[in-house]
Image (cartoon, coloured by chain):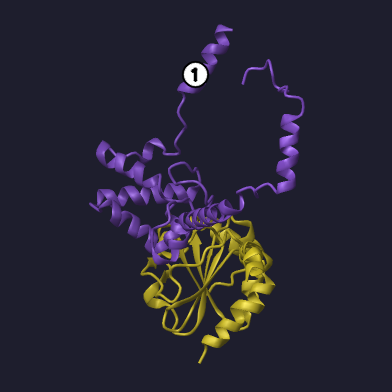
């Protein structure tokens, strides 16, 4: 009993170190924050489109099947890098919707003209207010939304092959009836 | 030398520069004051260890404007913070709220201090009785008497106590 008591502080220290180090070992980015909107409906918005008077993106018009909403900007390098991956997803039949965050429509248009356009629809969030409604704290961010318009997942940062294969695609498949 | 003193004086006088831009400031000084003190407690999500009042990040500016907008719209301080927490989570507050999930964070150090205190006291009390010196054996006492009576002179004679 006494010996157990003597090693107790050591055991507590080991447990503490392991529990604190575990997220780091797991490769979790400590800067990454979980979305408050998980399992909540996409906030109400009605954004104008890229072309004057053209179709934009509104919550009421979200498709009633699982889809992705990608927050991007022409001034953001990882957004540029993830476009081919989003295109590949779109080619596989995934609906990818875009919100152009704090970007001039002409810059967004040029960005899409040079890289290709994976987006079924694009809404323009010039002043970033809808970004704030969504809790966006940096671009790119990608939301997985189910058929009922409920946010199921948020990915912060570039959609890499790994993220697409391991997280987005399985989740979309799981959400599909 | 005088120049150095002047320079030092200037450096001491200069306050930290806030990130708030002139075009953000509200015309009502009372509201502006509230906006400043609220902003000081709101985390900039981009830099994560700065308040939005200190940060030059674009998002921090947007959030400062949101804070002012809500205040102008007549929100209470708590309503403004609730608005931000609803979008960014409690992490947006630089001071974590006291909820069951943060009790350990808030009171853990006190508990540790208490446990340490209890451990220290019990150890101290337990050690005391064993600290009493064992009485001299007869042989030791005889030897001591012999040493003291040796030649009747005190080895410490002439010294002050």
Q: Which residue is mark 1?
A: B10
Residue B12, percent from left and from top: 49, 22
Residue at 47 percent of width and 24 percent of height: B14
Residue A107, percent from left and from top: 55, 55
Residue A65 shows in the view: yes
Give the left or right position of residue A31, taking residue B83 as reference.
right
Query: Between residues B159 and A174, which one lies in front from this camera angle?
Result: B159
Query: Between residues A12 and A83, which one lies in front from this camera angle?
Result: A12
Toward which corner of the image does residue B93 lie, by quadrant?
bottom left
Query: Between residues A103 and B55, which one lies in front from this camera angle?
Result: B55
Secondary structure found at label 1: helix
Residue A47, percent from left and from top: 40, 65
Residue A125, percent from left and from top: 44, 60
The hue in which chain A appears in the rendered picture of the protein: yellow
The hue in which chain B appears in the rendered picture of the protein: purple
Query: Between residues B46 and B65, which one lies in front from this camera angle?
Result: B46
Q: State whether residue B9 is above or below residue A81.
A: above
Residue at 45 percent of width and 22 percent of height: B13
Give the left or right position of residue A144, taking residue A23 as reference.
left
């Amino acid at each position: 009993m006494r010996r157990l008591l003597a090693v107790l502080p050591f055991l507590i220290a080991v447990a503490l170190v392991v529990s604190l180090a575990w997220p780091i070992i797991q490769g979790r980015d400590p800067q990454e924050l979980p979305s408050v909107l998980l399992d909540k409906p996409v906030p109400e918005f009605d954004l104008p489109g890229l072309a004057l008077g053209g179709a934009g993106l509104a919550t009421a018009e979200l498709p009633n099947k699982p889809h992705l909403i990608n927050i991007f900007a022409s001034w953001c390098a990882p957004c540029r890098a993830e476009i081919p991956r989003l295109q590949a997803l779109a080619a596989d039949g995934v609906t990818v919707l875009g919100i152009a965050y704090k970007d001039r429509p002409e810059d967004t248009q040029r960005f899409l003209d040079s890289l290709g356009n994976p987006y079924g629809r694009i809404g323009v969030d010039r002043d970033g207010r809808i970004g704030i409604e969504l809790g966006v704290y940096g671009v790119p961010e990608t939301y997985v939304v189910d058929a009922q318009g409920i946010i199921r997942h948020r990915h912060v940062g570039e959609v890499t092959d790994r993220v697409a294969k391991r997280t987005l695609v399985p989740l979309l498949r799981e959400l599909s009836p | 030398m005088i120049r150095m003193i002047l320079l030092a004086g200037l450096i001491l006088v200069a306050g930290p520069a806030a990130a708030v831009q002139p075009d953000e400031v509200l015309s009502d000084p009372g509201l502006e004051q509230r906006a400043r003190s609220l902003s000081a407690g709101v985390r900039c999500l981009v830099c994560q260890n700065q308040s939005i009042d200190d940060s030059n990040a674009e998002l921090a500016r947007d959030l400062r404007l949101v804070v002012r907008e809500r205040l102008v719209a007549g929100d209470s301080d708590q309503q403004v913070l609730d608005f931000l927490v609803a979008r960014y989570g409690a992490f947006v507050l630089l001071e974590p709220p006291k909820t069951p999930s943060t009790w350990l964070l808030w009171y853990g150090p006190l508990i540790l201090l208490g446990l340490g205190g209890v451990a220290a006291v019990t150890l101290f009390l337990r050690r005391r009785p064993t600290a009493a010196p064992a009485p001299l054996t007869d042989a030791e006492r005889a030897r001591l008497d012999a040493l003291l009576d040796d030649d009747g002179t005190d080895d410490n004679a002439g010294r002050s106590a």
